[in-house]
Image: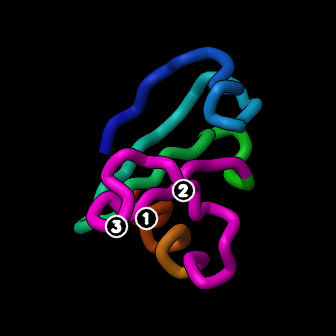
Amino acid sequence: MCEYTLGSIAKWGLECPDRLRMVRDGPWKLCYSLDNRAAGLLYNLEQDPLEQRNRFGEPECSDVVAALMHAGR
């Protein structure tokens, strides 16, 4: 887990304050705003090593998002 600030990350399709957290577990990498947990980036690095497909909003990935957010507490 790491925490960092970037300001606006609009280039990745997110508008959020700059307090972000990144959690990685196995193939999954999650980056989310500490101020707005409804916004985030989720990638399966085994299937998508170049991080081209953000899977954060996909219903089939909701359990992965919840588990990674819990791990990032």
Q: Please name the residue shown 53% across and 68% down the image.
A: 65
The quadrant of the picture occupied by the N terminus is: top left
Q: Please name the residue shown 70% across and 48% down the image.
A: 39
Pointer 1 or 3: first along the chain: 3
**Above or below, comparing residue 62 to residue 21 in the picture:** below
Kind of residue sitting beneath label 2: Arg
Residue 40, horizontal then vertical, whole percent: 62, 49
Pointer 1 or 2: first along the chain: 2
Circles 1, 2 touching at the beta carbon (< 8 Å): no
Q: Which residue is mark 3?
A: 47
**Quarter of the figure with residue 62:** bottom right
Q: Residues within 10 Å of mark 3 (few under 14, many from 20)?
A: few
Left or right placement of residue 23 versus residue 65 in this view = left
The CA span between labels 2 and 3 is 10 Å
The CA span between labels 1 and 3 is 18 Å
Region rendered in magenta: 39-62
Circles 1, 3 touching at the beta carbon (< 8 Å): no
Pointer 2 or 3: first along the chain: 3
Mark 1 vs mark 2, foreground winner is: 2
**Quarter of the figure with residue 68:** bottom left
Give SS at disc 2: loop
**Quarter of the figure with residue 67:** bottom left
Q: Which residue is mark 2?
A: 53
Q: Please name the residue shown 66% across and 73% down the image.
A: 58
The CA span between labels 1 and 2 is 18 Å
Q: Which residue is mark 1?
A: 68
